[in-house]
Amino acid sequence: MSYHKPVLLTECINGLNINPNGIYVDVTFGGGGHSKEIIKHLTNGRLFAFDQDFNVIDNSIDDSKFKLIKANFRYLKSFLKLEGVNKIDGLLADLGVSSHQIDTPERGFAYRYDSDLDMRMDSNSSLDAKEVINCYSESDLSNILYQYGDLNQSRRIAHKIVNSRKKEYIKTSHELIKVLDGLFSEKNRNKFLARIFQAIRIEVNDEINALKELLKDVVGLLNNKGRLVIISYHSLEDRLVKNLIKKGNIQGVEQKDFFGKVTKDLDPVNKKIITPNNEEFKINSRARSAKLRVAEKNIDNE
């Protein structure tokens, strides 16, 4: 199974500051590129990897220090507890959809293929893109397109989809694109369609709520001086991560102690967001919108 080189690989490994005897988690295993590099730095440590896409089992690593768990990372804490793990030394997340998923036509993630509107990362999930497009109310569709796709004309788009589906069920990506014809110029076609498909995908996989649950649990799981390393591709994702690191919670509301000091458990390791360089853009187009944030736990809560 072919997967592209993982995004910001060197920067992620440096960010984890790996203890050879530590316990680490890669919550977005995918092609295993990040995990394979982490394993190289472990002596007696352990690496647990999560992925909800059953297809990644083919990429599993044959190493006694490694275990792949087929589950959404929102259940991280529960599954680690089953493994007898209550504390970890670092966590890596490369959010969004993998290049392999995008490049597999039958998965329905990419608008360039005329494929079934699916977009499920977990093929056992009941909700797919067809249901979102054909069954959601006009107002719900509009909200999804606005929040997850940053589309200012979301109401107009939703209205056109709803009117079209009254005549005929929308089953494939190209049928959806045909419905949207006239709402975008040829110059803006790719950007417009990418945002439409991104918004639907995020809704299908409940990606934002899953990330919120992960971020809610991760600080308590980290050992003191443990590292949090997250690559995001969407402004809403990045805002949640930024809020947790800088404000101490995903809402971004500062909480202060009796002395007026902001109470938070993470310190940013890098003052500025880390982004890929031009060379990486050439190798992996998916890296274009990647933003990496690295943080270190500064106290022990327990």
Image (tube, helix red, strand yellow):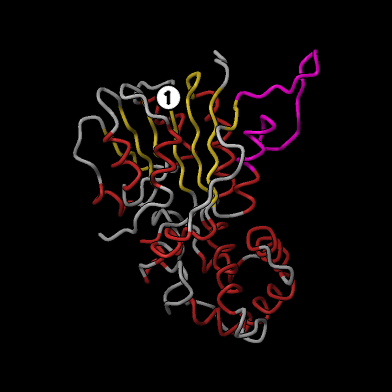
Q: Is residue 255 magenta?
A: yes
Q: Is residue 279 above or below residue 8?
A: below
Position of 72 compared to 208: left or right?
Answer: left
Image quadrant where residue 106 sits: bottom left
Front-most of residues 30 and 203: 30
Label 1 is placed on what type of residue?
Answer: Ile
Which residue, given by chain and number where applicable, does mark 1 sit on?
88
Position of 30 compared to 252: left or right?
Answer: left
Instruction: Identify the magenta region.
Output: 240-265
Tell me the residue at 66%/24% (across/down): 264
Percent coordinates x, y for residue 224 in the rendering: 50, 18
Percent coordinates x, y for residue 293 in the rendering: 55, 41
Front-most of residues 104 and 3: 3
Q: Residues within 10 Å of mark 1 (few under 14, many from 20)?
A: many
Judged from the image, the secondary structure of the residue bearing numbered disc 1 is strand
Q: Quadrant of the N terminus?
A: bottom left
> How many numbered marks have been drawn onto this rendered protein structure?
1
Percent coordinates x, y for residue 46 in the rendering: 30, 27
Percent coordinates x, y for residue 82 in the rendering: 37, 26
Q: Is residue 131 above or below residue 262?
A: below
Image quadrant where residue 184 sits: bottom right
Image quadrant where residue 279 sits: bottom left
Position of 274 compared to 16: left or right?
Answer: right
Q: Is residue 184 above or below residue 274?
A: below
Q: Quadrant of the C terminus?
A: top right
Q: Main secondary structure of the magenta part?
A: loop
Q: Is residue 42 magenta?
A: no
Tell me the residue at 55%/69% (across/down): 194
